[in-house]
Amino acid sequence: MLIIRRHNTDPYFNLATEEYVLKEIKDDSFMLWRNAPSIIVGKHQNTLSEINLDYVKENDIKVVRRLSGGGAVFHDLGNLNFTFTMQGESNLIDFKKYTEPILEVLINLGIDARFEGRNDLTIDGKKFSGNAMHIWKNKVLSHGTLLFSSHMPDLSKALNADPLKFTDKAVKSVRSRVTNISEHLKTPMDVMDLSTLIEKHIMEKYPDAIFYDLSEEDHERIREMVRTKYGTWEWNFGYSPKYNFRKVLRTQNSGTLEFAIDVVDGIIHDLRIFGDYFSLCETEVIEDALKNVPHSEVKIREALKPYNISDYFNNLTIEEFIEGMF
């Protein structure tokens, strides 16, 4: 068992590291790591329908898709993440096995922490850890969050998407009552103190465990995965399942516009715009210009550069139009 030390807090790098360790490091491993403020969405989710896009942009929160299924979670430096990669398991889907060491540490601290439901850890009925898995060949990657001192208002706002905007078949996150571990400690400590206790317990539980640092070659290969996958729009947003997006935009100077967008593999398949607006030019020109364009703010802005948007929607600004598309 390798206890792989991780210090990077960049979420793109950290999610890439999980896949790299799973597929390239033959030994079983355990990792503890933290992310700067970010949203981590499940592999099968529609990213835009899980996040509060305006809040994410205003607060420069990175959004990253992970390998495993399940729901979207918010990470900050008050959240500690743990990951096991194991091979040759007879029962690969076993959340209890991989969360047991965490529960043992918390119980030793006098906290009544429990495994509940399908894959959650709770204190007094409130969730502090959600867990997910990904199977690759005969190996399992099992990972989970540990809310220790996360800023709950940020968690709530970042994941507060408008459910009325989207119709799709993607997996939806189920919001639960949550709590921070720090609120239940009898003796105060910080998140890194907990990290040290967990590592020590893993060393005791797995007698063959040793500390291990990834090499510079490992880091370079992980950075390449960030460049080609984890840091890309195609993986984090474009990978989303087919969905239909609807939004009504009410403006002071242009009236009401209703956007109806069909998206397939992250690409705008069809777009219709309705409303009580006036126009100098046929708005179908804009609809056609955005077909086959990624449902991405950057790509939409690029596609609209040749057009004066107020000619097609009287007095509408490009910023207001972009607002209607998300």
Image (cartoon, rainbow, N blue to C red):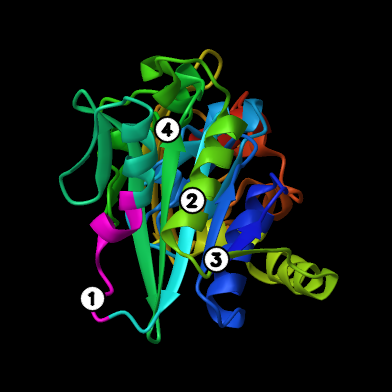
Q: Which residue is mark 1?
A: 91
How far separated are the C-alphas under marks 3 and 2?
A: 16 Å
Q: Residue 254's x, y, as percent?
A: 53, 21
Instruction: Residue 77: tell me if it is visible.
Output: no
Q: Residue at x 28, y 74 (%)?
A: 92
What numbered label is drawn on residue 169?
none
Q: Are marks 4 and 3 in contact (CB under 8 Å)?
A: no
Q: Which residue is mark 4?
A: 159
The disc, 4 or 3, on the residue closer to the chain's N-terminal end is: 4
Give the secondary structure at mark 3: loop
Q: Is residue 2 left or right of residue 265?
A: right
Front: mark 4 or 3: 3
- Viewer-side residue, 278 vs 324: 324
How far separated are the C-alphas under marks 1 and 4?
A: 33 Å
Q: Residue 241's x, y, as percent?
A: 37, 63
What numbered label is drawn on residue 82?
2
The disc, 1 or 4, on the residue closer to the chain's N-terminal end is: 1
Q: Are marks 2 and 4 in contact (CB under 8 Å)?
A: no
